[in-house]
Image (cartoon, rainbow, N blue to C red):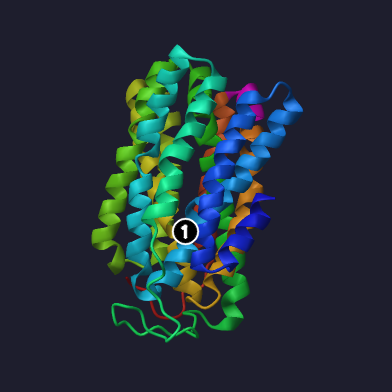
Amino acid sequence: MAGLVGIAVAILGNETAQRFGRVGSVVSALALVALAASQELFTFGLALAVVEIASALVLYDAAFAAIAQTVGAGRARRAITQITLFGGFASTIFWPLTHVLLQSMDWRSVYLAFAAIQVLVCLPIHVFAIGRPLVEASGADKAGEPVRPDEPPTLPRELHLQAMAWLVTSFCLSGFVFSAINVHWVSALEQTGVTAATAVAAGALMGPAQVGIRLLDMVIGPRVHPLMTAAIAAGLLLLALAVLMLSGASPVGVAAFAIFFGLGQGLTSIVRGTVPLALFGRAGYGARLGKIAAIRLVVTSVAPFVFAMAVGISPWIAFGAAAALSALSLAALLFVPRQGPDCRA
């Protein structure tokens, strides 16, 4: 369901995506209230499904499509990096915040608190802070940069299917790992003997790492092909897991794991939007991004359950499997065709 909504949002125009963002904030709040009110597994599962649907309306994929339509392909990479820059502090703020809240209230009250944030913080931003598109129907934006609706893709059309297949494979594999570990970060590390407080403290390092790598990408990213950035992101994820396992989950190893994991995740959020734009161009970008997101969401939605079962057997088996998937994600990028000119910010 979330994937189907993601396609719809990506295909629709910028203004519609903005309206959906407003609806998404309201739906997100209602879904969190439903989670708090759930008294049985079935209703809890339904509420989680609504949360996933709402996420397709308010998170990165819909925003990237709107950005490309708003500023054009030439400036989209920098704009995408800028918007992900603000998201980099999510783990820094919400891991400790969630931990603190759980010390003073039950999990239902925490969901209600997050629902209030959706209504009091996120909804006003969608209503008042998001302006109208800069790209006009006349074929030029308000800054004077020519806009060509029929911009040619950077890859020949006959290579599109091959490129999409390998790109989706890589994004799904890395997305599986990120989704699994983000959900089970604390519990999986506790199974290795790490205390919850240590895991949470290390998790707070993810945010600064994400922000730092995104700032670096703003400086040197335009000189690096997005596919290379994607390879670096996959390599950092693999490095994070290797460090964790080789260190035996020591405090220093866990901290290094969090930093490398945050660096990889910070770049991955960017390349999800910039690589398809670089390979295929802006024509049909929203629909293509929606299709990629739909497949990735299906895969990542099962990741926490599969990872939890693996952790139940052995946390080291779970982390080892995650490392293998990360290596396969990196390998898949090697098969993506690289013909055509670079797409630079």
Where disc 1 sits, the SS reads helix
Residue with the mark numbered 1 = 63
| Vertical side of 326 occupied by 83: above or below | below
Range of residues picked out in magenta: 308-314
**Would you call the spot at circle 1 few (<14 residues within 10 Å), some (14-19), or many (20 or more)?**
many
Residue 257 visible in the picture: no
Q: Residue at x 64, y 22 (%)?
A: 312
**Position in image of residue 110 (x %, y %):** 50, 23
Residue type at mark 1? Answer: Ala
Q: Residue at x 29, y 67 (%)?
A: 222
**Position in image of residue 98 (x %, y %):** 44, 25
Residue 329 is left or right of residue 309, and the answer is left
**Position in image of residue 262 (x %, y %):** 38, 41
**Position in image of residue 73 (x %, y %):** 40, 74
Q: Nearer the viewer, residue 267 or 165?
A: 267
Q: Nearer the viewer, residue 23 or 153?
A: 23
Q: Residue furthest left?
A: 219
